[in-house]
Image: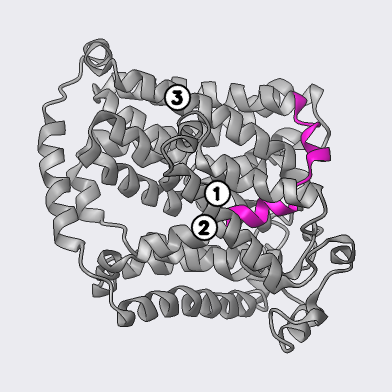
Amino acid sequence: MRRSRCPASGTGYHASMKEGLFSQGMLASATQEALITHPTGQFALLLGCLSVVFWAQGRPIIGRVFKILPAILFCYFVPTALTAFRVLPEESALYRWVKDFVLPASLILLTISLDVPAILRLGPRALVVFVAGAVGVVVGGPLSLAIWQHKLPDDAWKALTYLAGTWIGGSANGVAVQESYGVASAVISPLIVVDIAVANVWMAFLIYLAGRRERVDRWLKADSSMIAVLQHEMQEYQDSVTRPTSTKDLLFVVTLGFGSAWMCHVAAEWLMTLPAISAMKAYLGSFAWKVILVTTLGVGLSFTRVRSLEGAGASKMGTVLLYMLVACIGAEASFRRMADSGWYLAVGATWMLIHGVIIFGVGRLVRAPIFFIAVGSQANIGGAASAPIVASAFNPVLASVGVLLAILGYVLGTYGGIICVQLCRMISD
């Protein structure tokens, strides 16, 4: 199966790395037409875009826009606009490096904060509803493709790889699944529009339900008294892990992220030399194994003292790296491809409807409060970037519950996304 441009493995890639990430020797030919051709300049500009977006979000007047349009939308489309005006190139060694090493570093920093006991204390209903939401995404993908495939290209399943991962965890999982199947960023450009449009309408619906939680809980026949207990537990959790960040802590966090990313990269390359693993490379390439290894390592470290780095800002650093990844995805996207979203919007809407039917159906069956349903759904669909927003709509102190469930989504996202894509391939075949 064809890999995406600038492959992460091979003689050319490793030879260019010897000259340094930000050397002119790494520039793709496509950068010659762009205003900023050096990866260092591209890196600085993308960081500047992210900084301006989040600065604007905190301003009294400009910030009103972000109550309608989420910040992540601008993180996608400001770089896309810069590419459209040829300030940035559509192809760059920087984008490839960010996907190969910044993505795994982000994943491990987000997963080491996974607090399994705290999640278990949410009660079985919260976890059942969350898993039901993930199942809704896994099942909804192939079902929606089966309904609309007569309106789509024969290889439409490739474009769906991004949604399969990003709707169980977040953008990092979406890119992980996309790269696992060697799908170029240009192919998924229409799905970025679908993701933002459909997912944000769904989030608005969940926030709307938060304002009518008493009525919805009566329909669900749910007992919401556990929410008060949960608020108290989460406040204690926040107080116990927060501490001033030291230089030593920051060095440990950065070393853990990129050191683990490199070790898992080497381990994945070695695994691909084994005949049994190499035989599956059409389905699980070296990138997929790297993501699986780094996710598994992060979960394992969450049971050790390494997890204490969360109090020093490990997940915040992971989030910064994640937004850098989002900016690179936007820079690789093309407005020309976005005009092709058409029937993919119907696929996305049908997909989300199936997810909603399953998660609300299971929620009513187990009599879970709407809080668990709404946050569990958004933890799947939006990940750590937006799950706290929905949780805060119920009570600000509960924002961390959204983060905890979203982190669980990071763990399940890659695995569930790969299963979903395999089912979509079966439908296409």
Residue type (three-letter) at the residue carrying disc 1: Ser
Residue on which disc 1 sits: 171
Residue on which disc 3 sits: 204
* Quarter occupied by the N terminus: bottom right
| Mark number displayed over residue 322 | 2
Q: Are marks 1 and 2 in contact (CB under 8 Å)?
A: yes
Vertical arrangement, residue 44 with respect to residue 429, above or below: below
* Quarter occupied by the C terminus: top right
| Mark number displayed over residue 80 | none
Which residue range is magenta in the image?
A: 325-342
Give the CA separation, mark 3 to mark 2: 23 Å
Give the CA separation, mark 1 to mark 2: 8 Å
Disc 1, SS: helix
Ranked by sequence position, the earlier of labels 1 and 2 is 1
Out of 393 and 106, give the one closest to the viewer: 393
Ranked by sequence position, the earlier of labels 3 and 2 is 3
Disc 3, SS: helix
> Residue 164: where, in percent of width, then height?
59, 41
